[in-house]
Amino acid sequence: MIQNYDDALAFIHGRTKFKKVPTLKRMRRFLAELGNPQNGLHYIHVTGTNGKGSTVAMLRAMLLESGLTVGSFTSPFITRFNERIAYNAEQISDDDLVRLTQRLEPVVAKLDRELSSGGPTEFEIDTALMFCYMAEKNPDVVLLEVGIGGLYDSTNVITPDVSVITTVGWDHMKYLGDTLAAIATQKAGIIKSATPVVIGQLPESARKVIVQTADKLVAPRYELGRDFTAHKLNSHALRAQLQYDGLAIHRGHFRLGLAGDYQVENAAIALTAAQLFLQRRGLPLDQAALRKGLASSQWPGRMEVVNDAPLVLLDGAHNLPGIQALVKSIQDDFADRDVYVLVAILADKQYDLMLGELASLGNVHLTVTSFAGPGPKRPSADLATVVDQFTSRYPIQVADNWQVGFSQVAGQLSEEDVMIVTGSLYFIADVRHLFDD
């Protein structure tokens, strides 16, 4: 029986994470039992190896400033589960979460009895909960972030107004495939017939798959570098000012609230998706609203400034492409400063390659550590076993637990230095509690 918030979370987190055979049949049946709450809403559907959360955050801020009501579904959460489901940037309340989980529980029990593969997974329950909540709130648009992949993701039961594929890189290979083309095939699963798709900068093998899928479905393509462009105007600055060209905006100047060079591409993708959505819904384009939204965007754990002097940043770069984007930001924005990096990575990631990227920077002082991880099946990697593989300018330090590592690094900083905590969004979530008000 679900009686309170803790019961609701225990019920959700107690479900199996994955099933052996990927399918959307179970999700469609689940939603049918609930009266198909996903129908009748307008969506922007966002997938990609990295950049999904930041793109959704920017879209949310821009569309809110444009006067729309906006629902959003994101993952993972950084501090509380409720962050994942929001209406007008306000998290779902504990009471609504409990009430909707109580509604779902008997349906889940019924499907457990009736389906040979068992009832819904944890993420399918998260998704159904969100659809039920959005059906009640009825926002003008729901920003829907894919969990993993796209094709068989439980969010892929809708036809959006706009699809978005931010990036394709190496991650979740166990589920998505071990080539970029295979991973791209999964991401391309969110492209729908005659529905515009916004595409970021992709490796050629991935781009080819996505272009073929879009063309086959007669889905208009809008590609970064071809149909819209953005470039940073203020080099060596943490928060970019950029010039964007695309669709109805020509030589538009924007300032970003989110830090990090990689946000320039995400902002360009968000600007394009926002324009397409407004256009398709017959809504006016207010450039000043988009400008204000981009400047005010916030997203926890993505180059998030938690202290100013010395500068301390939390960046949940949780895979190789994410670390490569972080490395570029360090090279561009902090080349003249000493950067102290505290890193912990999950064991199922390419942690040796990720560490190698960080160790290669001449101004980085690297400390490796560990953390609890999201569960027993996904432990933190023992990075101490691989540090000898790397040649770095400064000796790589090892801290047995992250709290000790954080104190050691913080104690070495002068006001001009930079500290970056990275390697996993789950790790960032743990460290972020140190900075809670």
Image (cartoon, rainbow, N blue to C red):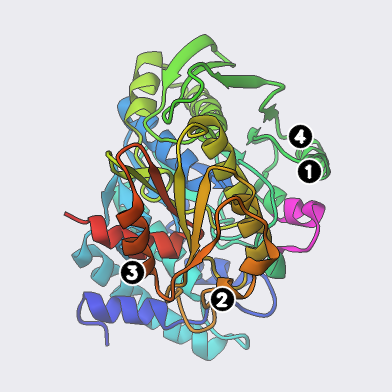
Secondary structure mainly formed by the magenta segment: helix
Q: Quadrant of residue 4?
A: bottom left
Question: Distance of mark 2 from mark 3, alpha carbons?
Answer: 16 Å
Nearer the observer: mark 3 or 4; the answer is 3
Q: Earlier in the sequence, mark 4 or mark 1?
A: 1
Residue type indicated by callout 2 = Asp
Q: Against 365, is 290 above or below?
A: above
Nearer the observer: mark 2 or 1; the answer is 2
Give the residue at mark 2: 382
Residue type indicated by callout 3 = Gln
Percent coordinates x, y for residue 107 in the rendering: 42, 79
The outermost residue toward the bottom is 113
Q: Earlier in the sequence, mark 2 or mark 3?
A: 2
Q: Earlier in the sequence, mark 3 or mark 1?
A: 1
Instruction: Give the camera-side residue of 164 and 430.
Output: 430
Label 1 packing within 10 angstroms: few (<14), some (14-19), many (20+): many
Say which residue appears at 24% left-offset and 78% top-offset.
6
Say which residue appears at 55% left-offset and 68% top-offset.
27
Numbered label attached to residue 333: none
Q: Against 218, is 33 above or below?
A: below
